[in-house]
Image (cartoon, grey):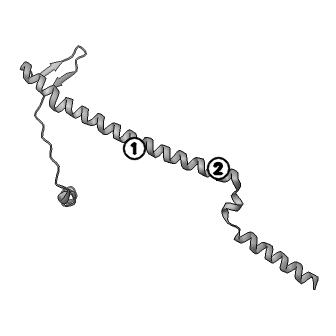
Amino acid sequence: MEEKFNLLDTLEKEFEDSVTSGVERVGQKGLASVSETAKQIRLAAQAIEAAQIDLKEKEAEHRRLTDEVMPALFAELGMSEFTLDDGSKITVKQTYSASPLKENREKVTIGCERIVMAT
């Protein structure tokens, strides 16, 4: 009879061990590691977002200089090209850009895919 109780005790212990939550098994050190890694992930995401904002600002400034400031300076001086001492050239050329309306972007993308596939 005592064997049956020991067997029941053993089975009960195994059952309790199997249903013990992962948090209880991980312990404080493991939870601290998870918490620290989560903080690092959040900080990395914030750094990426800040870098993307900074990049967009730098791209906008580059676009302003190349599309507005330099052409205006060249026009003011009656120039269309300038050669630097190292041999590189700065040339002002007319450029055009356009983008479809938001509601038409999918149609344009589908149309471009068809053109590429047809050629």
Position of residue 30 measured from the top left corner of the image (x, y, whole percent): 67, 52
Kindly tell me whether residue 80 is visible in this rendering. no
The image quadrant where one finds the C terminus is bottom left
> Which amino acid, mark 1?
Glu
> Which amino acid, mark 2?
Ala
Position of residue 45 measured from the top left corner of the image (x, y, whole percent): 45, 46
Q: Residue at x 86, y 79 (%)?
A: 7
Residue 102, quarter of the rendered image: bottom left
Residue 89, quarter of the rendered image: top left
* Cα gap from disc 2 to disc 1, whole angstroms: 26 Å
87 lies above or below 8: above
Mark 2 highlights which residue?
32
Q: Residue at x 25, y 16 (%)?
A: 86
The one nearer the camera, 29 or 119, is 29
Q: Which residue is the extreme one toward the top?
A: 85
Position of residue 58 measured from the top left corner of the image (x, y, whole percent): 30, 34
| Horizontal relation, residue 18 to residue 74: left or right | right
Position of residue 84 measured from the top left corner of the image (x, y, whole percent): 21, 16
Q: Residue at x 48, y 43 (%)?
A: 44
The one nearer the camera, 67 or 96, is 67
Circle number at residue 87: none
The image quadrant where one finds the N terminus is bottom right
The one nearer the camera, 84 or 41, is 41
Mark 1 highlights which residue?
49
69 lies above or below 27: above
Residue 61, quarter of the rendered image: top left
51 lies above or below 85: below
